[in-house]
Image (tube, helix red, strand yellow):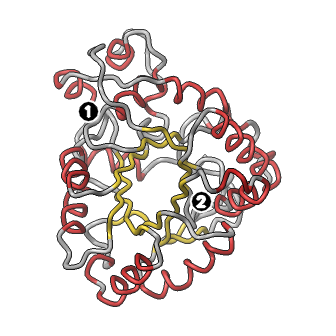
Amino acid sequence: MSDDPVPSAALGLGLAAVGRPAYITVGRDGDLGDPGDRTIDAMRARSHELLDAAWQLGIRYVDAARSYGHAEEFLGAWLRLHPDRATELTIGSKWGYAYVGDWRMDAAVHERKEHSVEMFRRQWPETLAALGRAPDYYLVHSVTPESPALADADLLEELRGLVDTGVRVGLSTSGPHQAVVIDEARTIDRSPFSVVQATWNLREGTVGPALARAHDDGWTVVVKEALANGELAEADPGGELAVAAAGLPLDAFALGAARAQPGVDIVLSGASTRAQLERGVASRSVRVDEETRRRLAVDPETYWRRRSARAWR
């Protein structure tokens, strides 16, 4: 780890963990309490408390999605309570997944993926109604090489039309082949895309060079899951992660490593408590040497297989 000054990406607030009762982040019972208390009203209040804290701490980017339960509705209600703040915020949201968990912790399926033009036409008005305004960025949610989105001529034309209205169109990526997807999206003829949200963390950082290429092309680069869904927020004393953090809070260390990545504009905090958000804001850029990165990293296929197997808590 180096203490040399390095550029620091801005911190944003992602609402994935507080827009629905269940999610795959570890430690949710400690953060949110008894699952039986996670009513819609309680999670709305939690979201609004975090949005208030984020505003007070200087965060000006907020991320939501159609599949994050009621996250867009919670954010839209908060924006209506604070119309003076709305013009100073950049709002990103995503389409392509529908929330189907019916606010149940034990739902067999929590979200359903569909990257069709019909899904876009259905979900864009839903986003407008929930937020009460157009988002600044609207992303295809979790594009993988198997997704039809990048080859669907009708969908791409619809997305170009959205760009013409002033909304910046992008995509989020998941899986071990994020770089392939980003490079393909960059090279589409008359590509509508100019924003990418990708998973980068100290366990799985293989997308880094592709993000730098997108940034060099003028894209806005957003990093998600910098804490690997909570995995990087806890460690055995004396273990490799704890040693690498060198006394820093683990979440601040992991966020700081992401904030120091070349070409990254925004790193999302998935905080569900004010204390987590404050540590994120206080995090400083941390340059992690290549040897340490290799020790902390896992094989991408293994990482994504483990992520897919995580229980919704």
Secondary structure category for the residue under label 1: loop
| Between 34 and 227, the one nearer to me in the picture | 227
Foreground residue, 273 or 294?
Answer: 273
Picture coordinates of residue 75, whole percent (x, y) = 68, 57
Q: Which kind of residue does numbered mark 1 sit on? A: Ala
- Say whether residue 157 is left or right of residue 43: left
Could you say where residue 86 lies in the image, as x and y percent from the top left? Answer: 65, 55
Q: Which residue is mark 1?
A: 297
Q: Is residue 264 above or below residue 66?
A: above
For the N terminus, the quadrant is top left
Q: Residue 29 shows which numbered tag?
A: none
**Labels 2 and 1: the sequence-earlier one:** 2
x, y (%) of residue 112? Answer: 51, 71
Residue at horizontal 38 percent and vertical 65 percent from the top: 170
- Mark 2 belongs to which amino acid? Tyr
Dot 2, how many residues are within 10 Å of its Cα: few (below 14), some (14-19), or many (20+)? Answer: many
Give the percent coordinates (x, y) of residue 22: 63, 51
150 lies above or below 99: below
Above or below, 158 against 173 in this view is below
Q: Is 111 placed above or below 229 here?
A: below
**Front residue of 206 and 83:** 83
Query: Marks 2 and 1, how far apart in space?
Result: 28 Å
What secondary structure is marked by label 2? Answer: loop
Which residue in the protein does label 2 denote?
68
Residue lying at 58% horizontally and 52% vertically, measured from the top left: 89
| Mark in the foreground, 2 or 1 | 2
